Amino acid sequence: MGSASKQTSNKAQSNKPSAKQASNDRRARIAELRAAEQRRDRRNKIIAGSVAGVLVIAAIATGTWIVVDANKDKKAKEAAAAAPIDGVQTFGDLSRNHVKEKVTYPQTPPVGGDHNAIWADCMGTVYDQPVENERAVHSLEHGAVWVTYNGKATPEDIKTLSEKVKATPYSLMSPYPDEQGTITLSAWSTQLTVDSATDPRVNQFFTKYVQGKQTQEPGASCSMGSM
């Protein structure tokens, strides 16, 4: 009996791992976990790098597209500004003196000449009453387009033109009962008469003459004017 009990105890002790073996196993497990963590970090970095690369390429492509598109738009506007517009009249060099008295202009509406020292507000301003000629002319000197109309203009014409003017800094609009044409577009020393707001030359005139080459004082304010 004693001998059998001793043998069993020795066998149990031989099956129990030694402290050294347990320490080795623990180190191996830690190393394995660290290796797995390093592999995961490398994989995440590769994924992140790939995503970043794709984003960079996309950003470059998008930026290139924006630049190309902007260049195309700029060239289109330059071409439109350079193109002649059928029916436009020009009147040469005109005087630019500031005066206090009323001026008799040769054109109706006027397109330039002596004018009041205070301009009419022309930051996309739509007036429902006639504007003083002398102040509107000063606005033209600053590069504004002045849209006028008489009683022949339809409510649809007035609505379309009002929306166009309100969306366009350096423009103004007002009724002008005495003008001969239904709708008149005026810039400094330049004028166009059309029968309808849907005439494509309206947009062409805005493109060419809002702050166009005819502007006598480029960059001058068009706000804080007065009637």
Image (spheres, grey):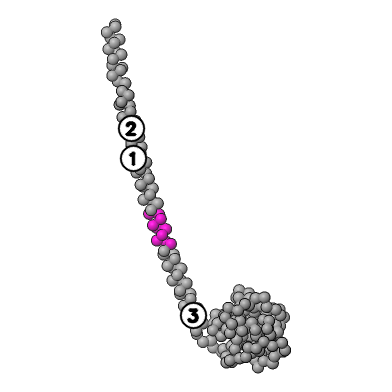
Q: Amino acid at mark 2?
A: Arg
Tag of residue 78: 3
Tag of residue 27: 2
Q: Report the mark closest to the observer, 1 or 3.
A: 1
Looking at the rendering, in which quadrant would you find the N terminus? Answer: top left
Q: Secondary structure at mark 2?
A: helix
Q: Position of residue 140 (x, y in %)?
A: 62, 83
What residue span does the magenta drawing correspond to? 50-59
Q: Earlier in the sequence, mark 1 or mark 3?
A: 1
In the rendered image, which residue does mark 1 sit on?
Answer: 35
Residue 202 higher or lower than 64, as above or below: below
Q: Amino acid at mark 3?
A: Glu
Q: Is residue 204 visible?
A: no
Main SS category, magenta section: helix
In this picture, residue 105 sits left or right of residue 201: right
- The picture quadrant where one finds residue 37 is top left
Q: Is residue 14 magenta?
A: no
In the image, 129 versus 163, the foreground residue is: 129
Q: Secondary structure at mark 3?
A: helix
Q: Report the mark closest to the observer, 2 or 1.
A: 2
Q: Earlier in the sequence, mark 2 or mark 3?
A: 2
Q: Position of residue 142 (x, y in %)?
A: 61, 81
Q: Position of residue 40 (x, y in %)?
A: 37, 44
